[in-house]
Amino acid sequence: DTVLTQSPALAVSPGERVSISCRASEGVNSYMHWYQQKPGQQPKLLIYKASNLASGVPARFSGSGSGTDFTLTIDPVEADDTATYFCQQSWNDPRTFGGGTKLELK
Amino acid sequence: QIQLVQSGPELKKPGESVKISCKASGYTFTDYAMHWVKQAPGKGLKWMGWINTYTGKPTYADDFKGRFVFSLEASATTANLQISNLKNEDTATYFCARLPHPGTNWFAYWGQGTLVTVSS
């Protein structure tokens, strides 16, 4: 299976820029997607195919990368962005998720 | 609007079975497969597999072959997940999820999740 590795946690101040990384154990082309999950809620799609903003998602969110290294950037960070962010690949079978990065605001 | 509404929380004992439902609305049910995703408490997400809502054929990820069954009540636009011989490690929130369009492979629509707790 394709293992997706994310840093467990990050802490930033509102108004700053934050980059959340996801590294794949093998190439996934551009088939990396990003989700936001708040406690007690279902995941919400933010970015699909590495860099495409999902419908209704603020332009503060952006994605980049291809192959094995991907980044989700939030700029500027707002208080409401406190959540866990997951990457997911759908190039290799089975589709897999990263362990999640918990974003906390200082 | 597109909605996936899941059944409520379940408390079960080891060895029992549970059936979770996912009621879809706002679109033609048989046009989109239904996927299932597991999230153990405080853990990440794990894709379980999917069911073709037109043919009823299920496909299971390797870790979910055997005790897990995907089924449909197509007339009720509902997908079901049944887990038999429950184990403590089945304690998790289970989500149903749908792709945005045929031919895509990311999850744009999610149910609210169903918490299954397995405890003696």
Image (tube, coloured by chain):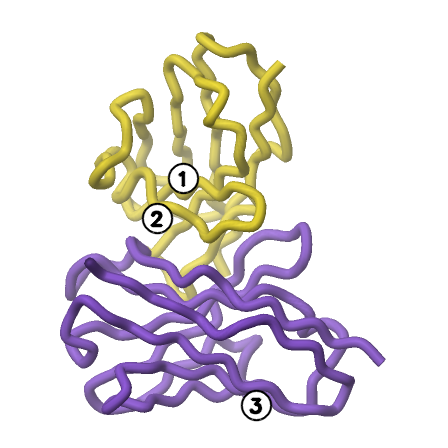
The chain shown in purple is which? Answer: B
Subunit under mark 3: B
CB-based contact (under 8 Å), mark 1 and mark 3: no
**Is B110 situated left or right of A100 in this image?**
left
Q: Residue at x 58, y 64 (%)?
A: B93
CB-based contact (under 8 Å), mark 2 and mark 1: yes
Residue at numbered disc 3: B66
Q: Position of residue B39 (x, y in %)?
A: 58, 60
In depth, the one of A37 and B1 nearer the eye is: B1
Question: Eyeballing the image, is B41 above or below A44?
Answer: below
Subunit under mark 2: A
Q: Residue at x 19, y 58 (%)?
A: B1
Residue at numbered disc 1: A68
Numbered mark located on residue B5 in the image:
none
For chain A, what colour was chosen?
A: yellow
Q: Position of residue B11 (x, y in %)?
A: 70, 77
Identify residue type, mark 1: Thr
Residue at numbered disc 2: A28
Mark-to-mark CA distance, 2 and 3: 29 Å
